[in-house]
Image (spheres, helix red, strand yellow):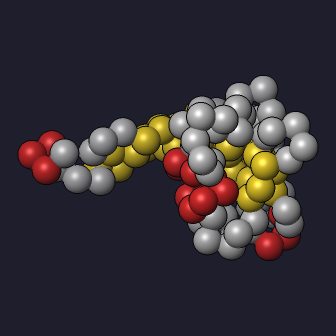
Amino acid sequence: MGVEVNKDLCTGCKNSSEPVCVKYCPGDLLMIDDEGKAAIRSMEDCWDCMVCVKLCPHKALETKLPYQLADYKARLVPEIYRSKIIWKTEDIEGQCEVFELQTKTEDSA
């Protein structure tokens, strides 16, 4: 699979000492390129944990589902909130579905 960087949305987190995608990638696969944008060192080494996708404050990263599972046009995008994650999926025909996952109760938020 792998992560795709939207260069129009990525800022390289210029106001931080280290971008969250770079800091928290467990495979040390993300870096900031010469243009100051996030880039993946080795797509084939990415195991799609989606840490970078979930943490990106600019929503500049997304996981591309592999052709074998969906098709190159399919998308899976999370929206992170204090007590939930909303997953938006789009299949190869453009049909969208939304799934909401509570991550903690409102009382503990």
Residue 82 percent across, percent down from the top left: 30, 42
Residue at far right of view: 34
Residue at far left of view: 107
Corner quadrant of residue 30: bottom right
Residue 14 percent across, percent down from the top left: 66, 35
Q: Is residue 75 left or right of residue 85?
A: right
Q: Residue at x 27, y 45 (%)?
A: 83
Q: Residue at x 75, y 65 (%)?
A: 29
Q: Nearer the viewer, residue 93 or 47?
A: 47
Residue 96 percent across, percent down from the top left: 59, 33
Q: Residue at x 86, y 66 (%)?
A: 42
Corner quadrant of residue 9: top right
Q: Is residue 51 left or right of residue 14?
A: left
The quadrant of the image that shows the N terminus is: bottom right
Q: Nearer the viewer, residue 65 or 50?
A: 50
> In this rendering, is residue 93 above or below 27?
above
Q: Is residue 73 left or right of residue 25?
A: right
Residue 24 percent across, percent down from the top left: 57, 62
The quadrant of the image that shows the C terminus is: top left
Residue at far top of view: 8
Q: Is residue 63 among what the camera can see?
A: yes
Corner quadrant of residue 7: top right
Q: Nearer the viewer, residue 23 or 73?
A: 23
> In this rendering, is residue 44 above or below 96?
below
Q: Nearer the viewer, residue 50 or 64?
A: 50
